[in-house]
Image (cartoon, rainbow, N blue to C red):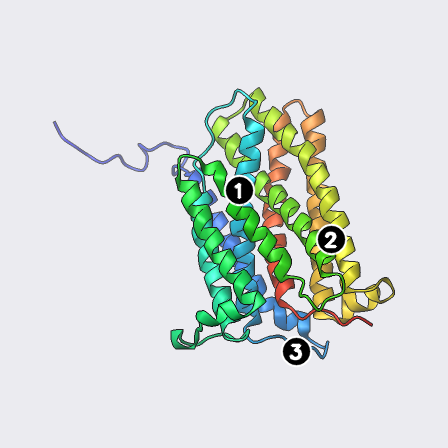
Amino acid sequence: MTLTRPTAGAAGASGPIRRPGTVRAVAVLVLVALAALIPLLAPSAALHGTGEAAAPGVGGIALLRAVLFAALCVPVGELFVDRLARTLPGAPAPRSWAPYAAGAGVLAALGLASVVSTGNLVPHSLAQVDVGGLYDSRDGKLALVEVNAFLAAGLCARSRRPATQVWPLAAVIVAEALRAHAAPEHAPLLGSGLTLVHLTCAALWTGGLLHVLRTLRRWGPSEAGAALLGLYARAAAVLLGAITATGVWSSLRRMPAHTVLDQLTGTAYGRVLLAKVILVAGVALLALWARVRLRRAADPLTACSPARAEVAVLGVVVTVSGLLTALPLPIRW
């Protein structure tokens, strides 16, 4: 008996064996790397010619906020879609990404808490981080809530009852809603309420679509897969309406109606907001395309193609949202 390695010809005349999983993983890593460049490079472009000054380390802060938002979307979407899938005779759900998302959320929240502890300045050493000082300010306490909530969410995700992570995730959303609207602001509770609804719906929409696509890949071509996609599509239409309404209302609170056109092009916040609106409009068109395919195509699962593009653009929207929260707020004229 002789052991020989197969030659290139023996592998098949059609050429080298392709590994779809590897190609897909590399493509995802490239997209993530490109998305990470947005908060790092975009602030200078957004601020150019506006006469505004950004806080120190605005690019890093924007990146941390984008990671925090993404870490929130993943487990929220999993809980949402798993609940939709309970009534369907599909295969088991794919492996949860919630523990990894919680870990990323803890790191992002710790980074943001360190900035808050130094008076919103980027610390250059651990000696500059004043952990005890976090208890002396409203923003510091909210930062600590987010760190602890992500820790609790990670523990819940590893437990026998992963659904319990809904409570610490809700604490993160509430903390973000309160952080975005300071007490001196006009009607801060209204602003926090709008942000609460906006962020919750955005997390359900973005994380939900990601988990639907992962679930369909696990289930394969089946009627249950098409039914799950249909259930998500109906919920997504409602979520998009809520996101649009709360987003417009929040923007008008930041920029009064008679100043919107000027501030959309003359302020960094307005420029990034305009970019976000354009991206969301593109996502809405992709969602509509997927919905048409789901209803009219011979194979409803062909709707997965525009849905994959939709989730990619939604990832960019999350990154842009992180940048938006780090830029100086527009001046109320």
Which is more toward the observer, 256 or 30?
A: 256
The residue identified by callout 2 is: 247
Q: Is residue 94 left or right of residue 211?
A: left
Neighbours of disc 3 within 10 Å: few (<14), some (14-19), many (20+)? few
Residue 48 location (% of width, % of height)? 68, 75
- Left or right: 284 in relation to 61: right
Cα–Cα span, label 3 and label 1? 38 Å
For badge 1, the amino acid type reads: Val
Give the labeled residue for mark 3: 53
Question: Looking at the rendered structure, which numbered label has been put on residue 24?
Answer: none
The answer to the question of whether label 3 and label 2 lie on touching residues, with beta carbons closer than 8 A, is no
Q: Badge 2: few (under 14), some or many (20 or more) residues near its Cα, within 10 Å?
A: some
Q: Secondary structure at mark 2?
A: helix
Q: Which residue is at the front of the view, 10 or 240?
A: 240
Disc 3, SS: loop
Q: Tell me: residue 173, above or below residue 80.
A: below
Pinpoint residue 146: horizontal percent, then vertical percent: 51, 56
How far is the residue under mark 3 from the one under mark 2?
25 Å
Res 204 quadrant in image: top right
SS state under label 1? helix
Three-letter amino acid code at disc 2?
Gly
Residue at 66% from the left image edge and 22% from the top image edge: 298
Vertical order, 317 against 139 (above or below): above
Residue 309 visible at all: no
Query: Which residue in the protein does label 1 denote?
Result: 166
Which one is in front in this view, the residue at disc 3 or the one at disc 1?
1
